[in-house]
Image (cartoon, coloured by chain):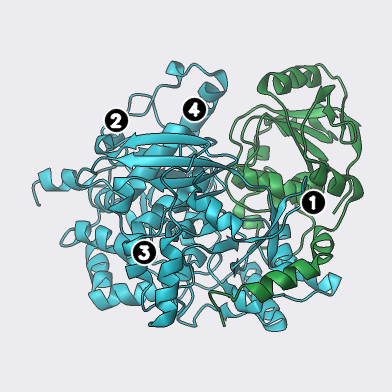
Amino acid sequence: MGRTLFDKVWESHVVRREAGRPDLLWIDLHLVHEVTSPQAFEGLRLAGRAVRRPDLTLATMDHNVPTGDDTPIDPLSERQLEALRRNCAEFGVPVHATGSGREGIVHVIGPELGLTQPGLTVVCGDSHTSTHGAFGALAIGIGTSEVEHVLATQTLPQRKPRSLRIRFEGDLAPGVTAKDMVLAAIGGIGVDGGVGHVIEYAGPAIEALSMESRMTICNMSIEAGARAGMIAPDETTFAYLEGRPGAPAAGVEWERALDRWRALPTDQDAVFDREVEIDVSAIRPQVTWGTNPGMVVGIDGEVPDPAELDDPDERAAAERALAYMALEPGTPMRAIAVDRVFIGSCTNSRIEDLRAAAAVVRGRRVHPSVRAMVVPGSATVKRAAEAEGLDRVFVEAGFEWRRAGCSMCLGMNPDVLAAGERCASTSNRNFEGRQGAGGRTHLVSPAVAAATAITGRIADVGDLLEAVPA
Amino acid sequence: MKAFRSVTSHAAVLDRPDVDTDQIVPKQFLKRIERTGFGEFLFFDWRKDPAFELNRPEAEGARILLAGRNFGCGSSREHAAWALQDWGFETVVAPSFGDIFRQNSLKIGLLPVQLATAQVKELMDRARAGEELTVDLEARTAGGYPFELDDFSRECLLGGLDEIALTLRHEDALAAYEAAHSAPISTL
């Protein structure tokens, strides 16, 4: 029987297998950041253990760092960053520290350095590690105890999850993006639809996507509850990787890598535990209305009525979500006014995302009642955007152009919503209080976020074209 | 890791689906570099509501938490499991769990018990009526219902075993893998 991409990566990383026990998997790349690592390093210290493979480990600073040019860091965050500096120095782990010019969101820098490669196993103490699956890697988010385990052993005991293939058929309509595809998929299968599974995204609509867009899709696998998301490597993947500093060197090494990578895609006769098919031609730009990413509708839709839900648990959750979001059933999504717009996060802060947003705002002005910010995913993305003049497009339109970091995706730094503020955000979670206690989040694509910043209400690009310029 | 054998206690009921780890412990408390003391931050925002389930007098001192489906979804923060354990919970019983939360809980000795939805609802009724419940890992039962947990996780929990030490016992296998596979990348 044929094997899936997931099967192939899994099987080639089994260090030890024993009946009744989880497989012991080798980890090729371990990414580390300041928030979920201090207790793991402390555990090593207490047990007198070393980091087994510092050469397969890379740390960055992203969650806590202020993104304003002059914003001071709070003492607790500084203590956490200092702990990472100290731990990396003590254990010999390379670190891309704030201000080094190489820092950025952990899931942005791995790929841009060319370290995230097809067929690798990647872990990080962060649920959005699934992002790296866009390259055909098996990338799993883990907790701090598992971080310690990987630091000490470069392995992780894992039971093999089930497999789920989501095939995206058809062609995307103009103005519809990878973010809309993945939000529609989560809306379809539910926020627990992927629990216990590794998802492979496939089909012509996936093959047509850039690497940046594929990363957006894999990034949000965890929002469907999945262990990981993967996409088969192809020429698009290879073209992205070629010449990056961490990629195999040109010549024999590169050719050998290509041979390995070309053998990875799922075999024709491979069988998945579950299959789902989605027609992308029917997808409209997506906007969340509630407090999890599965509470989502098309932009032409309206806030749903919980009374129409059959399941009492879901009805109660929807009622609670609408109360938190201060929304009435039946309200057209386009009628919802926002106070803030956030373009950034490991979901949508790469150069392609910034280009898409800049194309919408170029020559226009942010609505006077909106505060809008752009936070590039890494120092490298920031430099690339500035080289193209995107920073000027944003600043001239009235956006704040900020330094790299996780920023208002989770609001561990000073970039937070005030209670009651409503935000159109390109991030990945609209949980209660996610962007600040009492803040209200609508998840959208970069294009919709940009259009919303201009009109002050949820809008897509088409709405701007219809509007008469002032 | 804290060993777990059996607990008998009244239970707190949190009958909501998709409770995410951002609610269990909000982000502002993730800046600590210690592993202890997270209990006071458990459900920090929800606890401001006097009617919140864990503020009810009957939830006081409960060591068992009965929860809705997909409990602990979202962020990988192990702080969520630490906070529940530090608060005093020894086990969470739910129809399903977020995968990372479930893993994190197993690693620290907070027992995640998965039962059918109808069984969890029935236990919730019994808990609301004031009945004490027993979750017994040796027998693999919760409130009398049998639950599944793989033998390896059960052994680790019963013995409070250090999983890193278990893995390092297989140094020969680790070394053999390293010798046979040249690393495709280097971060140095």
Where residue A445 appears, x then y in whole percent? 33, 49
Residue kind at label 2, given as amino acid type: Gly
Hue used for the chain lettered B: green
Distance between the alpha carbons at the discs numbered 4 and 2 = 16 Å
Q: Which residue is identified by label 4?
A: A318
> Mark 2 highlights which residue?
A301
Which residue appears at 84% of the width and 75% of the height? A48
Measure the C-alpha gap from mark 1 to mark 3: 39 Å
| Mark in the foreground, 2 or 1 | 1
Looking at this view, name the residue that lies furthest to the front: A1
Distance CA(mark 2)–CA(mark 1): 44 Å
Q: Label 3 belongs to which residue?
A: A237
Number of the front mark, 4 or 1: 1
Q: Nearer the viewer, mark 1 or mark 3?
A: 3
Label 1 sits on residue? B108
The answer to which of marks 4 and 3 sits earlier in the sequence is 3
- Disc 3 marks a residue whose amino acid type is Thr
Depth check, mark 3 against mark 2: the one in front is 3
Alpha carbon of mark 4 to alpha carbon of mark 1: how far?
A: 33 Å
Q: Residue at x 59, y 55 (%)?
A: A10
The numbered mark 1 sits on a residue in which chain? B
* Of labels 4 and 3, the one closer to you: 3
Amino acid bearing label 1: Ile
Determine the colour of chain A: cyan
Label 4, label 3: how many angstroms apart (C-alpha)?
40 Å
Tell me the kind of residue under disc 4.
Answer: Ala
User: Looking at the rendering, which quadrant does residue A165 occupy?
Assistant: top left
